[in-house]
Amino acid sequence: MRLVARLREDLDTVRRRDPAARGRVETALVYSGLHAVWAHRVTSRLWRAGPAPRLLGSRFVARLLSQAVRSLTGVEIHPGARLGARLFIDHGMGVVIGETAVVGDDCTIFHGVTLGGKGRGGALGRRHPTVGDGVMIGAGAAVLGGVTVGSGSVVGANAVVTKDVPAGSVAVGVPAVARPRRP
């Protein structure tokens, strides 16, 4: 997707999902979650370019930039994480997305969410969660380890997910228990 089209898509995503969002200019200037996603696209490209033989290799620069963005936005996204299209991070502050995390398309993540690692990783070295398409993760939730949150699921506020969540489920509690969503 071309740069201008991607920027418009991101702005429209915020405006669709947040009733407080007004015009594109205001949204582009004041949404820290949007700034973090935009910055991640840059740091992710650097990260995927791989280590360079120089002292300041692309992975080092990617990590350095991601930490600068963390300081500015309050959102920490490791450059190795993979983010899908139309991700909306609402209120942003305190969101942490780890190195091997994968987030699908059309997801919404609220403030204080952690997509964190647990141990040294399971199958295929996955230490962080995989989140399917169209998932909403409520404020303060923690999704830990190499678990999968199925597409169309909702993780409730402050839930702690340590086991897979089937597609179309609601996961609530500590530890989270998944139940089918009501239509």
Image: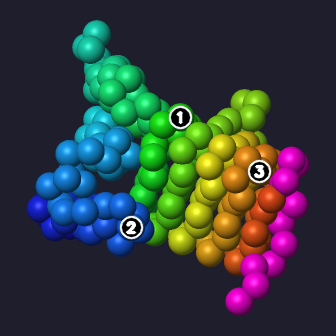
Crowd rating for badge 1 (residues with CA inside 10 Å; few <14, some 14–19, many 20+): some
In the rendered structure, which amino acid carries the disc numbered 2? Answer: Pro
Residue 175 lies, in percent from the top left, at 87, 49
Which disc is residue 94 wearing? 1
Q: Identify the residue at horizontal 59%, vertical 40% (top origin).
A: 112
Q: Which residues are magenta?
A: 173-183
**Does the magenta stretch mainly form a helix, a strand or a loop?**
loop
State the separation of the CA atoms marked 3 and 1: 15 Å
Q: Is residue 130 among the parts visible in the rendering?
A: yes
Which residue position is annotated with label 3?
159
Q: Is residue 50 among the parts visible in the rendering?
A: no
Crowd rating for badge 3 (residues with CA inside 10 Å; few <14, some 14–19, many 20+): many
Which residue position is annotated with label 2?
19
Q: Identify the residue at horizontal 60%, vertical 44% (top origin).
A: 113
Q: Secondary structure at mark 1?
A: loop
**Front in this rendered view, residue 122 or 141:** 141
What scheme was used to colour the molecule? Answer: rainbow
Q: Nearer the viewer, mark 2 or mark 3?
A: 2
Q: Is residue 152 above or below residue 160?
A: below
